[in-house]
Amino acid sequence: MNKHAHTEVRVFTDGGARGNPGPAAVGVVILDEKDNMISRSGKFIGITTNNVAEYSALIEALELLKEIDAYRIVFYTDSNLVYSQIKGLWKIKSPDLKVLNEQAKKMLYSLPNYDFVHIPREKNKDADRLVNKALDEQMKSLSQ
């Protein structure tokens, strides 16, 4: 893992479930200021909802960021729910999401300088691809 300091890193997160709830996965892509890939992750997380998967993707990204030294971090998500709840714009009614929100905020607290940007799905293709790849691999391994 690359431990030299970056001026800014861009973190793209996505989570998805096939069925809601259903088999779910997360995808994370972390790029440096020159669009070079620093880290990425795509993994199956079990049976859960889309919203839990979206939060789980953010938490996965925060875990990966522990190994990356960056002055500024910008998170990009196509989840309006995660964006709005992390920014404090929406109340959190679900107890499951409340726990994940608190966990993410605790991890965010240790970062020096960060922001969140809500993007359309078509601007989050790389993270989305990792979600679908993890789900496809899980389905294939179950059918063997």
Image: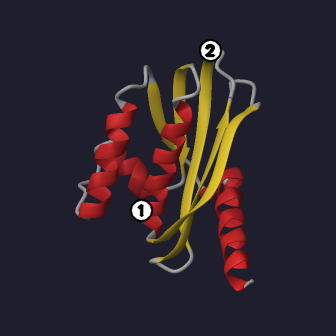
Residue 106: image quadrant is top left
| Residue depicted at x 57% and y 20% | 69
Q: Could you tell me residue 63's position as x and y percent?
A: 50, 39
Q: Is residue 19 above or below residue 69?
A: below
Image position of 46 with respect to 22: above or below: above
First-in-chain label (1 vs 2): 2
Name the disc covering residue 24, or none.
Answer: none
Residue 37 is left or right of residue 77, and the answer is right
Please tell me which residue lies in front, 78 or 63. Answer: 63
- Label at residue 5: 2
* Coloring scheme used: secondary structure
Q: Residue at x 41, y 52 (%)?
A: 82
Is disc 1 placed on a helix, strand or loop? helix
Whether residues under marks 1 and 2 lie with C-beta atoms below 8 angstroms apart, the answer is no
Query: SS at mark 2?
Result: loop
Pick the quarter of the image with the C terminus: bottom right
Q: Work out which residue is located at the far front of the displayed protein and give it.
A: 144
Classify 12 as above or below 141.
above
Quadrant where the N terminus sits is: top right
Crowding at mark 2 (Cα within 10 Å: few <14, some 14-19, many 20+):
few
Residue type at the position of mark 2? Ala
Image coordinates of residue 135 in percent, x first then y, are 65, 69
- Which of the 4 image quadrants contains residue 3? top right
Q: How far apart are marks 1 and 2 (CA)?
A: 31 Å
Q: Position of residue 130 (x, y in %)?
A: 69, 57
User: Could you tell me how many numbered marks the image carries?
Assistant: 2
Binning the other alpha carbons within 10 Å of mark 1 as few (below 14), some (14 to 19) or many (20 upward) gives many
Residue at x 59% of width, y 25% of height: 68
Q: Is residue 95 left or right of residue 70?
A: left
* Dot label at residue 52: 1
- How far across and down, in percent of the image, does residue 73 sit? 53, 28
The amino acid beneath tag 1 is Val
